[in-house]
Image: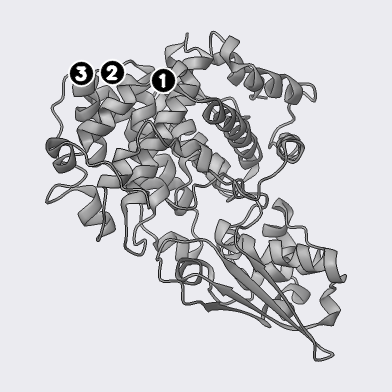
Amino acid sequence: MTVAKKLPADTAENPVFALAHHVVATRFEDLPANAVRAAKTFLLDSIGVGIAGSDGPWVKELIATVAKWGSGNDARLFVHGARLPASSAAIVNAYQIHCLEFDCVNEDAVIHPMATILGAIMAEADRSGGISGKDFLTAIAVGIDSSCVLGLSSKSPMRFFRPSTAGAFGATAAVAKLRRFSEETLVNAYGATYGQISGTLAPHREGSPVLGMQIGFCARGAISACDLAEAGLMGPKDVITGMYGYLPLYEGEYDHVPVFASLGKVWQVTNISHKPFPSGRLTHGVIDGIQQLIKSHGLKAEQVDRMVAKVPPLAWRLTGRPDIPDPEPNYAKLCIPFVAATALLNGGEVDVQHFKGDWLTNAKVHDLAGRVVAVQDDNPLQNKVAPQRLEVYLKDGKMLAVDMPEIFGHPKNPLTAQQNLDKFRRNWKAAAKPLDPKGADAVIDMVENIEKVTDMRALLDRIVA
């Protein structure tokens, strides 16, 4: 058994200083090869889902609304290309990255870290200019650490929408890294961020677009907080473990000491899972299981009497919801019965078109979904995505089952490099406005060789119509 190194007393009492030191001190050269590889992989993946998300639900309305919130042309929007103040561009770009439920996730922290981070730092890079690829990738790595350590410290069931609440700290760290803040200035920025974070699970439960917008609001908050800290604002300091700090108020029971002791030793970017399908990660177990049973037994929808998904408490609470006849897109994406029925009726495939239009009211989908039930297993850990088990009961009386210790997309069961590229190219073609067909390969090459990029605006040039 490994014993976690004990932090110095002052750091253990107020870990915000340890976090700030980690962010400020880290150089590109400090990143191990596997962290650089993972950061490139999920940068490309996040750009891709942001491009596809340009045609997501409520994007046009959000752009039209946000454009009224102030003048300025600091930063451009993915695909749409409109210029807005950086803080407003951050809202829209972050929302586009998350609105399809297609963006990567750190399963142990239960955070989609890249949406807030990339939404904020793409706007920051466009506004500032001259941000190198090395600095950009380093900001991603320390930003992911900054949000994930909060989720990893929690021992309680998730009660706020952590991708936005904890994600705000990650976005702040990443923006601050690009601006080369001192530790003192970053601590003040964290304090200013804490005064702005939002993220309730109510829109998750109801399927409201506000869910992803919260990620955008916190990306905006990160830029605003860094602006305030840079101007000299003194923010509150005890914002992680203090009496009114993030962990006791937003999370409940927690243990931050071993997690913060791992900073600089364990890079959380290497622990990120892909989302092979545009639905809640907690629904991916049934898709994975159905794909396996199609491959091993030739499973078809007409053979099935009923299905039982046995899932951890987190998955049951957030996605074990019943099927309803006319769901909102976000409700359907976060509904195990709907996703399972969709997967089986499509030969194991689930894609963006299955959460829009007529498919949402398809009678065959709802007939099969009505025979799917999610059951909470006895996993004692409150924030686990896996293991999951799928049991399929056939009309001839047989039962097929598949156990998934790690669901497809997890670092231990990953997409191949080619599957990652295929996902990016599909997303490129799904943009709301046509993009240069040759641009996809140019972006892939640019991300792969990001160390040579001298100004990240060149990448954004490629992803606007």
The answer to whether one can see residue 64 in this image is no
User: What residue would you read off at disc 3?
Assistant: 231
Please, what is the three-letter code of the amino acid marked with disc 1? Answer: Gly
Residue most extreme to the right: 298
- Between discs 3 and 2, the one toward the N terminus: 2
Please, what is the three-letter code of the amino acid marked with disc 2? Answer: Phe
Residue most extreme to the bottom: 397
Q: Are marks 3 and 1 in contact (CB under 8 Å)?
A: no
Mark sitting on residue 24 = none
Vertical relation: 122 (above or below) 284: above
- Crowdedness of circle 2 by 10 Å Cα count: few (<14), some, many (20+)? many
- Crowdedness of circle 1 by 10 Å Cα count: few (<14), some, many (20+)? few
User: What residue would you read off at disc 2?
Assistant: 181
Q: CA distance from mark 1 to mark 2?
A: 24 Å
Please, what is the three-letter code of the amino acid marked with disc 3? Answer: Ala
Q: Position of residue 167 (x, y in %)?
A: 39, 42
Q: Nearer the viewer, mark 3 or mark 1?
A: 3
- Between discs 3 and 1, the one toward the N terminus: 1
Residue 339 versus residue 421: which sits nearer the camera? 421
Mark sitting on residue 72 = 1
Q: Which of the 4 image quadrants contains residue 193?
A: top left
Q: Nearer the viewer, mark 1 or mark 2?
A: 2
Q: Which of the 4 image quadrants contains residue 301?
A: bottom right
Q: Are marks 1 and 2 in contact (CB under 8 Å)?
A: no
Vertical relation: 256 (above or below) 120: below
Residue at figure coordinates x 32%, y 46% from the top left: 150
Residue at figure coordinates x 49%, y 52% from the top left: 107
Q: CA distance from mark 3 to mark 1?
A: 19 Å
